[in-house]
Amino acid sequence: MSSRVFPRILRQLAGPALVAFGSVVPRVAVAQHDHGAAPATASAHDHAGKPVDCRALAAPPWSGLPAKDLAAIRTLQSSLASVRSSDGASSSGFSPAFGDIPTMGVHWINGGRMMDGVQMDKPDHLLFTNIAGRDSLVGIAYAFRGPVDAKIPKTFASELAHWHDHPELGGGPGQTLHMLHVWFVPSPYGPFAGNNFFLAFMSAGMRLPDACWIRTDAEVERLELVASLVDVVHRQRNPSVDGPGGAMVRRRLEGGLGANLGDIAKRVEPSLRALDSAATRGDKAAWERAADEALATLRPVERRMLTLFRDRVKGIQSSMPDSRR
């Protein structure tokens, strides 16, 4: 799945919302943001994320981060006390865009801040996810629009602080929207991952699996597919989760799954209950069995469509050359 497809879908579906978003994203000169590139990383870097140290980097307080990063995140969270609710965010100049995007939540954007470039103490995006029936602040994002080869601001010292980009939101040839997420909730791929597959379980009110159960390629594949299944089933049962404009985006992402979701939800319900029970007990073997059973209830075409959904979600994040980090 091309990394450009999802932004193009947003353009087709979101219309005025996307135009408004693009209008507040500044075109930033390279020199303005040349604060030194972040540390280099392995060439095999997956821009959507990879498992991290499960005890120190997969959940707050992110104790495996450099001390400077820990202090910055704590200061940042303290400064956001007034915007932890959607009402507070709204009164502080933030507005939602695109609805609830799988693995990312709803991006609330502050147009004024978007015009000021990247400022560590003033994130221009707030990430909200509906948990237990209310919108909860799960993270923030920094963003700026500039040349594809722009130097990235020196924000955090950790090698995990990978920026991703959205070429279709760049505003013109050779331009892209550069973005960095910072999660305040558990994230199996770390505090700066582009995608957080734990959000689906949180939104559905399910217990999270232990991050230490997700290390090998097979375990990553299982997590991402069953999280995607939990996501689409939960949204089918709770349409209000999507928020304004989100349902259109979700339907396009789901593709052929949409017509069968009601039937799929009934078939997987026992397995999802077993999945939640196993996570509550801390039983890895039982959790894996329940996850595999849930996926096994899918017909071949449904499994292919679920995999495509997962790939589209991950494809939202565009990779960036390691030399620019």
Image: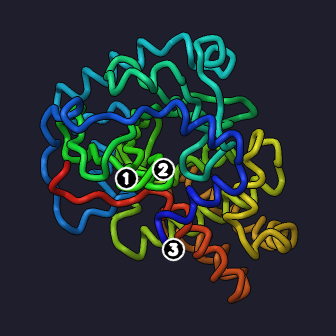
Question: Residue 295 sits in which quadrant?
Answer: bottom right
| 249 to the left or right of 137 | right
Residue 154 falls left or right of residue 190: left
| Mark 1 residue type | Tyr
In front: 52, or 48? Answer: 48
Mark 1 and mark 2 residues within 8 Å of each other at the beta carbon: yes
Q: Residue at x 27, y 43 (%)?
A: 161
Residue designated by label 2? 196
Q: Is residue 237 above or below residue 125?
A: below
Dot placed on the residue nearer the N-terminal end, 1 or 2: 1
Q: Is residue 221 above or below residue 116?
A: below
Q: Secondary structure at mark 3?
A: loop
> Which residue does the image show at 23% across and 33% down from the upper left?
33
Compared to residue 249, the image places residue 265 above or below, namely: below
> In the depicted view, which residue is nearer to us: 259 or 21?
21
Q: Do we see residue 50 in this rendering?
A: no
Whole-percent x and y of residue 324?
19, 51
2 or 3: mark nearer the eye: 3
Determine crowd level at label 3: few under 14, some 14-19, many 20+ residues with C-alpha closer than 10 A: some
Residue tagged 3: 1
The residue wearing badge 1 is: 189
Q: Nearer the viewer, mark 1 or mark 3?
A: 3
Residue sitting nearer the eye, 199 or 47: 47
Instruction: Tell me the amino acid under the disc marked 2.
Output: Asn
Kind of element beneath mark 1: loop
The amino acid type, in three-letter code, at marker 3 is Met
Q: CA distance from mark 1 to mark 3?
A: 21 Å
Which of marks 3 and 2 precedes in the sequence?
3
